[in-house]
Image (cartoon, grey):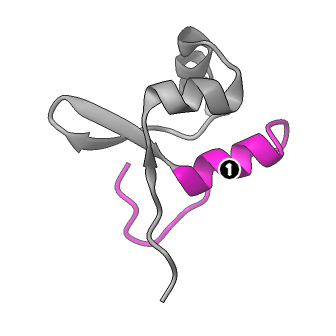
């Protein structure tokens, strides 16, 4: 059984990517950065696997279509 995907919060994301908060949200709107997922009413995060794929190759990153993916 594969390990569960961790949820990364914004502060961790800022450190991992080196991007500013406004740049991350602009890239999400442009479709060039993984979208956040809602983890509660007042909290959101990013799938670590999506962030890792973006960090590995930010220029050619494309969102993956997962079966049953709710974003």
* 45 relative position to 23: left or right: left
Residue 15, located in which quarter of the rendered image? top right
For the residue labelled by badge 1, is the local secondary structure a helix, a strand or a loop? helix
- In the image, the segment drawn in magenta is 48-71
The one of 9 and 39 positioned closer to us in this rendering: 9
Q: Residue at x 58, y 16 (%)?
A: 26
Q: Residue at x 71, y 52 (%)?
A: 53
* 28 relative position to 58: left or right: left
Q: Position of residue 62 (x, y in %)?
A: 70, 48
Residue at image mark 1: 52
Q: Position of residue 51 (x, y in %)?
A: 62, 45
Q: Answer above or below: position of 25 versus 52.
A: above
**Which class describes the residues within 10 Å of circle 1: few (<14), some (14-19), or many (20+)?**
some
Q: Answer above or below: position of 5 versus 39.
A: below
Q: Is residue 62 visible?
A: no
* 24 relative position to 61: left or right: left
The one of 47 and 65 positioned closer to us in this rendering: 47
């Amino acid at each position: 059984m594969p390990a569960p995907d961790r949820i990364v919060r914004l502060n961790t994301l800022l450190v991992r990517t080196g991007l500013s908060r406004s740049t991350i949200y602009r890239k999400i709107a442009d479709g060039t950065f993984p979208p956040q997922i809602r983890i509660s009413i007042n909290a959101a995060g990013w799938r670590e696997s999506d962030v890792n794929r973006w960090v590995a190759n930010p220029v050619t990153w494309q969102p993956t279509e997962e079966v049953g993916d709710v974003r």
